[in-house]
Amino acid sequence: MKTTVEIRDQLYARAQKKAQRDGRSMRSLIEEGLRLCLEADERAKSGRYRLPDKSVGDPKGPNPLESMSWPELRDEIYGGR
């Protein structure tokens, strides 16, 4: 479907730069933005928040932190601060 949308010049310029940097069209950028907005609205209406998966490493592999003592874990967390 074709439509016309008025967007502030400053926002359009930022979006255009983002699209160019990512090597994609303005259409795909706008569609993604609308999709994300609508999905967030659906999640908010469901009343449930689902944490995004930010895990690292092999989920089937051993947990390297399990063998550490509390002082070792603390040093790992704070990075020697």
Image (spheres, rainbow, N blue to C red):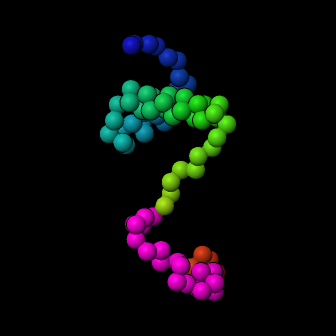
Which quarter of the rendering shows the N terminus? top left
**Is 22 placed above or below 29 here?**
below
Can residue 11 be seen in this snapshot? no
Which quarter of the rendering shows the C terminus? bottom right
* Residue at screen point 39% across, 36% down: 19
What kind of secondary structure does the magenta stretch mostly adopt?
loop
* Residue at screen point 33% across, 35% down: 24
From the viewer's side, name the closer residue of 6 and 72: 72
**Is 32 placed above or below 7 here?**
below
**Is 68 placed above or below 15 here?**
below
Please identify the quarter of the rendering in which residue 61 is found. bottom left
Whether residue 70 appears in magenta in the rendering, the answer is yes
* Residue at screen point 63% across, 84% down: 70
Residue 60 point in image, percent of width and height: 40, 66
Residue 26 point in image, percent of width and height: 39, 29
**Is 21 placed above or below 8 here?**
below
Can residue 4 be seen in this snapshot? yes
Q: Read off the magenta span.
A: 56-74
* Residue at screen point 47% across, 78% down: 64
Residue 11 point in image, percent of width and height: 53, 31
From the viewer's side, name the closer residue of 63 and 16: 63
